[in-house]
Image (tube, grey):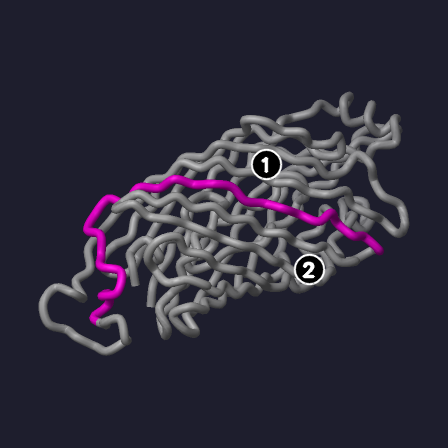
Amino acid sequence: MRPYLLVPLALVSSPALADHLGPSGAGSGSGLAVIAPDTLDAGHGGIGFRLLYTRTEQRTDAELDTLAAQGIGAHNTDYNLNGSAGIAYGITHQLTVSAEVPYVRRENLREGSITGTERLGNVAGIGDITLLAKYRLTGEEGVRFAVIGGIKMPTGSTHQLDPEGEQLETEHQPGTGSWDPVVGVSAAAKWGAVQLAVSALYQFSGMGAQQTRLGNRLQGGVSLSHHFGPVEAEHHRDGEDEHGHDHHDGAAGAKHDSWDAFVELGGEWEGRQQIARSIEDASGGSWVYAAIGVHFASAAGWSAGAAVALPVWQDIRASHPDNRYRVMLSLGRAF
């Protein structure tokens, strides 16, 4: 298994607009949100942990209350913290499956009101589990392609209450209560130690708790990464030849510590949410960000990563605040 495949299992960022984790990629990554088309070797896998910290622009109580007077249910948090634990496994050399369990925390959630800003407290809990499969359509040389498909299941909590004992709106809950199909594509090309990768994932939001349908989501981008360390042969890794037969002579199975650095231009779009039959015009929006990060993979199978993203353009509607920055930390272990 190539070292750069052992980096975090889930490198797709959480959506900037809604308060839930977006679809996740597993087994490989080329950036913060870009998923490479590479798959894990048959019988190999890994576990990983990811932490995403999003700092939003801060709006005053007066600004929130002014929006409420206009019929817009605007809210703010001090920050959003999304953690996740994931596992990926190579069914064949072409097919990798994964599962991710998220943890959601929103610090100091508050919402505007015509009678004064409502303090909704801290919201924390287990979110919705995502199952994904990535199938590589090409070989490991030249331009590589993969297709991605899966489902987000309604496993998270949808019954948390505010300090007054009222049930929080679905967009503020750790879970959504909906079944959401996910589809995506990925492509990449390598020139020695340099790789260019592009990917996109689209999530179809179903009807969830409290008759709420959150907006559909699209996320993706382009990433340029550089591998620092020995470049392993494409068809001779982990002591196997191109036919999968073992050969342990020489240095074919040798493993080394290595680093990957990347820059990425990514983006996220989210459609408007619907409550009952009413579409909220002030919800949804989009943003484009630039990110830089590093991945480390040890010869023993451990990996770690870090990245920071800054907005270069955003058009987020009034119900949600703009983003100031995002930080990602991750840790993985191959098996």
In the displayed image of the protein, which residue is found farthest to the front?
142
Q: Is residue 167 magenta?
A: no
Left or right, residue 91 beside residue 267: left
Could you say which quadrant of the image residue 92 lies in?
bottom left
Residue drawn at x 69%, y 25% is 59
SS of the residue at dot 2? strand
Image location of residue 314, percent across then percent down? 63, 29
Say whether disc 2 or disc 1 marks the residue closer to the N-terminus: 1
Query: Image height check: is 11 above or below 285?
Result: below
Left or right, residue 174 beside residue 73: left
Residue wearing tag 1 = 79
Q: Are marks 2 and 1 in contact (CB under 8 Å)?
A: no
Residue wearing tag 2 = 180
Residue drawn at x 9%, y 67% is 250
Residue drawn at x 42%, y 68% is 94
In the displayed image of the protein, which residue is found farthest to the bottom?
245
Mark number displayed over residue 279: none
Query: Image height check: is 95 above or below 300?
Result: below
Amino acid at pointer 1: Tyr
> What's the distance in space between the residues labelled 2 and 1, CA to CA?
25 Å
Q: For the magenta stretch, what is the residue range?
A: 211-239
Tell which tag, 2 or 1, sits nearer the viewer. Answer: 2
Q: Is residue 213 magenta?
A: yes
Where's the N terminus, which quadrant? bottom left
Image location of residue 56, percent across then percent down? 60, 31
Residue drawn at x 47%, y 38% is 327
